[in-house]
Image: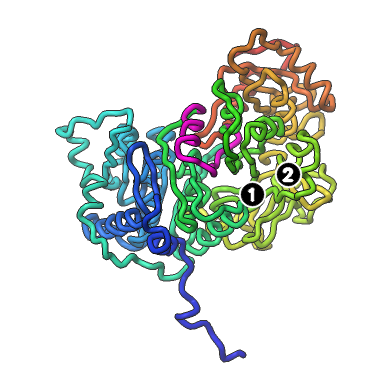
Amino acid sequence: MEELKPRPASSSPLTPLGFLDRAATVYGDCTSIIYNDTSYTWSQTHRRCLQLASSLVSTTGIGNGQVVSVLAPNIPAMYELHFAVPMAGAILNSVNTRLDARTVSILLRHCESKLLFVDTQSLSLALEAISLFPPNAKPPLLVLIKDDYADAEIPNSSSSAVDSRFCCTYESLVEKGDPDFKWVRPQTEWSPIALNYTSGTTSSPKGVVHSHRGIFMITLDSLIDWEVPKQPVYLWTLPMFHANGWSFTWGMAAVGGTNVCVRKFDSPTIYSLIKKHGVDHMCGAPVVLNMLSNSAEIKPLQNPVKILTAGAPPPAAILSRTEALGFIVSHGYGLTETGGLVVSCAWKRAWNKLPATERARLKSRQGVRTLGLTEADVVDPESGVSVKRDGSTLGEIVLRGACVMLGYLKDPIGTNKCMKENGWFYTGDVGVMHPDGYMEIKDRSKDVIISGGENLSSVEVESILYSHPAINEAAVVARPDEYWGETPCAFVSLKTGLTQKPSEKEIIEYCRGKLPRYMVPKTVVFKEELPKTSTGKIQKFVLREIAKRMGSPSSARVSRI
């Protein structure tokens, strides 16, 4: 059989862009997008994306392989750009809308963005970011996404800053585009499709480059693993700029789903949209689960809603409260570098017979590799040898498979550091492997606390804190200690409407009854709200700096900030 080689008919490059063509054929008259009073069908979304891609090539002069950025929330334009930009042969760069102007400016310069689509709400941010460009750097042209639902006014059109930077509006590009445009297929399936910057929770953001092949694989893999049916009604509570919505931007086209877009949300908004549109699927970090289960408007759901959570280890107490409301929680693990979730807590029917607390404990584990990932392991970071499957020996989580990134943009040292010659991608996450082969994250490598020579997991301490009936949010970091080296310092926010607030001593005593002595927080800091990234991850580096400034604890005392 050696004479049989790949031919053009059998070696077309894999790409998720074809999902939209198919959706227009199979689900053409079905609803694709709902946003307030606006709705589109899949045939309309397909047509709009082709027109936009056509205009990107003919009107803005975007060339193959160039970077096109977007600064927008979860609105229809943001969804359409996930198809239109790569259909023009360009690379999509979705920018976090909650970054400061300086960081946005740095990212735009770093990726050499040629065009920036900017939503009305983020216009002032974009203009400030561009004003920070050095004189010899060419900033991207701006395309304004006008939205009557944005809580912001468009600057005076006579403004020189606006006039000199804007080339057109989003809808004008759509209107003048060719609906019969033959979209640009990737030259190879390894061609870049997306550039996403990491959240920077532990270091400076890095530009993660993904290929058409990688996104194709993670998209189908995620749909299979979460068992997403055809034509789901999906509520966009997860930011699309966060790893492209864990690949479900493209995934919803593959299954002909309805995308319920929402600019901003709170607990009442989510419950209202679920009821109004019959939402049956949504994603979100554990902070979203916490918000839903602590809402004053809590009412059990009339129909179950599947919710996929990741981004941070979810405390068992939050999982239990959320499922009691009628949400069916699935738990997964992934990184910006994997384009979506590549490890999931594959559920076994036998576990349904276990008590609720035990089910929640099992579901809080990250789990096993998904079908699309080749391998996942927990290894000693020095030797590369797999750790014992005892549920307690710490090691670094390593992965390999088709959905792992191509590498970091303009950062060969960073790429080589995490993608080693032994064929593994080193995540920087610390975890354990349980006897049944399920892994569990215990910390980021920078978040492990070493107290008196003992390594302790901040996640384990946080899980106990979340089980306290008065605590709303919790994060544990290392506080310098002259004797122990480091001691656990807990930052917590309390639930609203409490008749009696717990003291630091009471919380410490609560933990002492549930944890080994060396893991019990020595300090408790009360805050109104813990600092978070836009994706709901608590910014522990901010809390670590606060703990450092507090110095070594000389005596137990309550701290309120």
Residue matched to label 2: 440
Task: Quadrant for residue 547, please give it.
Answer: top right
**Mark 1 is on which residue type?**
Thr
Please check the rendered image and state whether residue 277 is part of the magenta-colored stretch, yes or no: yes
From the top left corner, tell me how far across and down residue 56 is, in percent: 27, 56
Left or right? Give the position of 533 relative to 48. right
Question: Is residue 447 shown above or below 521?
Answer: below
By secondary structure, the bulk of the magenta-drawn segment is best described as helix
Please check the rendered image and state whether residue 498 is part of the magenta-colored stretch, yes or no: no
- Residue at the spot x=41%, y=70% of the render? 187
Secondary structure state at the residue bearing disc 2: strand
The quarter of the image holding the N terminus is: bottom right
429 or 229: nearer the eye?
229
Residue matched to label 1: 427
Q: Which residues are magenta?
A: 267-287
Left or right? Give the position of 218 relative to 54. right
Nearest to viewer (mark 2 / mark 1): 2
From the top left corner, tell me how far across and down residue 136 is, in percent: 28, 46
**Mark 2 is on which residue type?**
Glu
From the top left corner, tell me how far across and down residue 201 is, in percent: 56, 37
Q: Earlier in the sequence, mark 2 or mark 1?
A: 1
> How many neighbours does mark 2 have within 10 angstroms: few (below 14), some (14-19), or many (20 or more)?
many
379 or 289: nearer the eye?
289
